[in-house]
Amino acid sequence: MTTTAPLLNVAGLCIEFRTGDAVVRANADVSFTLTAGRTLGVVGESGSGKSVLCRSLLGLIPSPPGFVTAGSVRFEGGELLGLDEAGLRRVRGTAIAMIFQNPMSGLNPVWPVGDQISEGLRVHRGLASRDARARAVALMQQVGIPSPEKRYDEYPHQWSGGMLQRAMIAMAMACEPRLLLADEPTTALDATIQDQILALLVELQERTGMAMILVSHDMAVIAETSDEVAVMYAGRIVELASTAAVFRAPRHPYTLGLLGSIPRNTGDTRLRPIPGQPPNLVELGPGCSFADRCVFTSAECRVTPAALRPVGPAHLSACLFPERMTAASA
Ligand SMILES: Nc1ncnc2c1ncn2[C@@H]1O[C@H](COP(=O)(O)OP(=O)(O)O)[C@@H](O)[C@H]1O
Ligand SMILES: [Mg+2]
């Protein structure tokens, strides 16, 4: 049997935001590994800690108010937490790239789009301006931007949202990342453009062999793109397994709720809310944070800490009583 060393190993990651007297535990004991060439889908309602997780991998948590209080993030064997700004810049420019939900948050409005794509090539790859421009044009072509020669000198406001997201992807690809963090890359786009962008990401991944963390609140997107799924709730991973296992036999009631919320045959795959509200991350009790919304809950759920643990082969769940789900569906 051969074992592949993971590209990324996140262990026991805890991140909190301190504002006044309030402490928000945005990531609590987050652990997972990711192998080269694979995609981890991260899914969960708004506020569950998905973006904080992605940003922390690149040292992009503003501090204060944010603090990484425990854990480790090893990439290709080296620790990323605690890297200085120069070290982080090197990682961002050459190994790990991130694309955001809103492409404008990654682009400078007063600078031609093409120059922003070629900047990384000049700064990190040391390409001469002419060569960087040629490579940027080729990248723009690859991500499906029409007439890239002409559009190179245009400004962001002249472009549609879908084209700007393509530009962001071209910028990310310029550094030939081994890991791409895609934080809701299609949420701001309409459905047909969304499909094109996802297909593009999958195609780039197959061609380059990069690994990907794809954040979405859309289970259908995760189903189409991910090898494994991490379901986040209230700052924790509550279920972690292969995509097939999560969809076939979810072992956490929250995941079941997310799956039940896929409306069928309407083309609309956005989450319909699970009844109730996510808990206030400032006032989490000792027990399972999903207990108040869970249909299987019992008194013990409110007092016993629910840690992520194996419930089947390569299948982790933080539910104290996963058998209640199976009993209910039998
Ligand atoms: N800069 C910040 N200052 C204070 N709190 C923050 C900051 N960024 C994120 N948070 C808090 O961390 C929690 C998780 O946020 P986030 O990761 O953005 O959620 P998601 O991406 O899953 O919607 C939220 O409660 C949010 O309010
Ligand atoms: Mg987010």
Image: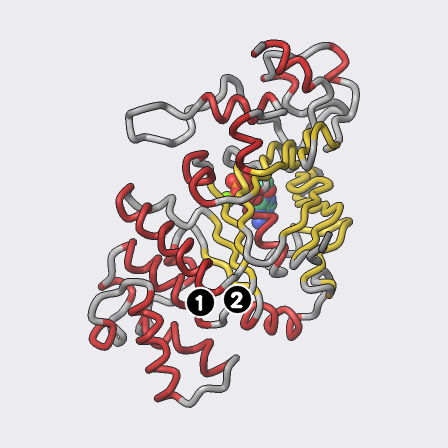
Measured in 3D between alpha carbons, the distance from the residue under mark 2 to the one under mark 1, in whole angstroms, is: 6 Å
Q: Position of residue 152 (x, y in %)?
A: 27, 75
Q: Nearer the viewer, residue 222 or 283?
A: 222
Q: How many marks?
A: 2
Q: From the image, tell me which residue sits under label 2.
A: 177
Write the residue at 42% across / 40% down.
221
**On the picture, is 168 further left or further right than 319?**
left
Look at the picture and state if 263 lies above or below 27. above
Residue 62 seen in the figure: no
**SS under mark 2:** loop
**On the picture, is 178 further left or further right than 169?**
right
Q: Is mark 2 within 8 Å of ligand 2?
A: no
Write the residue at 72% across / 33% down.
308
Write the residue at 23% across / 77% down.
149
Identified by mark 1, the residue type is Met
Q: Which mark is residue 173?
A: 1
Look at the picture and state if 190 lies above or below 301. below
